[in-house]
Amino acid sequence: MSRWSLGRMILPLLAIVVPATLASAQAKLDKQTVNVKDTTVQFTMIKLPAGEVELKLGNLPAKKVAVKSVWIGETEVTWDEFDTYAYGLDIKDEKEKIDSVGKTRPSKPYGAPDFGFGHAGYPCLAETYFSAQMYCKWLSEKTGKKFRLPTEAEWEYACRAGGAPVKIQDKDALAKVAWFEDISEEKSHPAKQKAANDWGFFDMLGNAAEWVDKDADAQKADEAYDKENPDKPTKRAEMPVARGGSWKDAADKISSGQRFPQTSQWNVTDPQNPKSRWWLADGKFISFRVVCEE
Amino acid sequence: MEKVGFTRRNFLKTSAAVSAASLMTNLGTNFAHAAGSDVIKVGVIGCGGRGNGAADDCVGGGEIAGAKVQIAAVADVFKGHTDHLKNKFKIADDKCFSGLDAYKGVVDSGVDMVIIATPPGFKALQFEYAIEKGKHVFVEKPVAVCPAGVRIMLKAGEMATEKKLAVVAGTQRRHETNYIDTIKAIHDGAIGDILHMSVYWCGGGIWWRNPEAGMSEVEAQINNWYHYIWLCGDQICEQHLHNLDVANWVMGSHPVSAYGQGGRNAKMRPQGSEIWDNTAVEYEYPNGGRVLSFGRHWPGDGNVSEFAIGSNGTSNPGGWIAPKGGQRKSFRNARSGYVQEHADLIKSILEGKPLNETKAVAESTMTTIIGRMSCYSGKKVNWDWAMKDSKLDLVPRNLDLKGPAPKVEIPIPDGKLV
């Protein structure tokens, strides 16, 4: 029995229980290693089986969403991968490298986007949703395959390994699979230090929260809210959503269903106007993993 | 170790006494607007990303302090750069200024206060002019790039005190409760006497702006100012100042000397950039303590922070203390320092107790400059020599905006004090 399964047994108080789409939670899924040409970038992806997941997004009624079979990153994107893109390490021509900054590649970060937590093997941090999307675009161009961010349904389906929602209330059990406030020492940690879930995904809970593509119904609800509250300075519809919680979150915020819409606090100390569209000055808890459709 | 007639705690007691005395001043005419109007008119000099951000921060700071801030005039070397603030705050055309002397237009436009957010090389002369004309000032850091500029700042800062003008610098950590509370605990002796600090600004790099069509050499350099020493002062000055400012704050003094090294990896800087991409400087302080500074623009492990070792524990002055054998204690920030510094500035004006941070930021700027001078020259640079005798003056006084770039030697450690 995996540690995540153990956690679920400890806490079967879930409001929604969705039958696993696989006969066994221990199923071995296909894996592939992705190599990116002109670089030393290499990472592992796991093939999600097609299936269905029941989502409960905020105040919206629960709904069932079909998930196609796609490949999804075994871990969050690490600095080893993101540096190659961000610093143009794959570009040989110096002029091309300079010209790409702030256009197709991230602007130079004002400070240290790893916040001194650690670098090699650590999840990349503080990228905006836009920046994460642009990384996927670069990866698509380099590999000839279509990369993108996971949808909320894909992310939750992978996080739950096709099973019921995951919320582990016993902190000792949670500590076996996730970095969270009580044990993180106020920083992120290298990928794959905690146990994987039943499908082999690491760090979906805790360590760094992960950008996802917002669910269409949730987006409509946000737009309606903004229309009813025109005086609110922050427009919900303009704020992307992260999942999974992070090293800075309390244990009760770490679950497969908890959503983290971006707030102005995630970029409050960017001293520039306009603020960077590539980096979140205070996003020391945000990362992402990628999906490949082929 | 040589003993000096100076201890950290004595220094702090002295500072506190001076500070209390300086507050025992009569209110001057500079506070008339606070009594007679509920609007503080602010001019912005330098409308790049930071100037635009500081304008918003000032409005936010005013709200916190209980005053309405009106961004009333703007200036930038480049005409188009003022458009954002002009449109946002509906500023009349005759209050928008461009060119090298545009700052004078803003200062003389009837504002109560100015925000100076221009490239570092320009700040000292602009600050001096604003103080001469009786304006309260928010000045971004660093405030100079050479000893000559630091001397201008210090003299003008004294003038500000005489005129009862408020000056707050863009060393925002001094307005963040995580730093304030941690450093208070350090100064209260929580980890004993500070023997050593390491301070870091190791980040991933900096933007490069290609010359735009029709730009003169001077215009191109001002537009791409980070890469020219006469405008920027190098990375140790422009960015790493923040961490060295914290070091001076914790140590209770500026250093007495700097001994450094560094260089520039061709791959890390575009061709034409004058600045280095790494520096490492050891500073000696009056109590014999040392501060090791690391500045870097490389990919890889980053670190922008400070660390202190005391005789009885350790601390990150940005948020925690760990006394030896005791309980580690963390301190949180209450509000963005970028807004809080404006709130504190405006509050001090309203209360008739003007803050004046000129000396602290000028000394932190000088700390970075002697570090850079040591790196460039290969020599140990003493504070007193640099402050009194250095002839280094990098900023041309009669600059032609349409002219050729000032001639600056790209530094190499050749024994000369560049």
Image (cartoon, coloured by chain):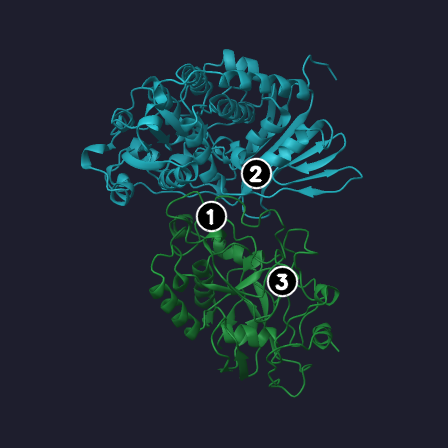
Q: Is residue B230 visible?
A: no
Q: Chain A is drawn in which colour?
A: green
Q: Are marks 1 and 3 on the same chain?
A: yes
Q: Do labels 3 and 2 share a chain?
A: no
- Whether pointer 1 and pointer 2 mark residues with C-beta atoms closer than 8 Å, the reply is no
Of the numbered discs in the image, which one, if any, rests on residue A206?
3
Front disc: 1 or 2: 2
Q: Name the residue at 47% across, 48% down.
A: A268
Residue at label 1? A268
Q: Chain B is drawn in which colour?
A: cyan
Mark 2 residue type: Thr
Residue B378, image x, y percentages: 58, 23
Q: Is residue B245 visible?
A: yes
Q: Distance between the residues labelled 3 and 2?
A: 28 Å
Q: Is mark 2 on a helix, strand or loop?
A: helix
Q: Nearer the viewer, residue A90 or B59?
A: B59
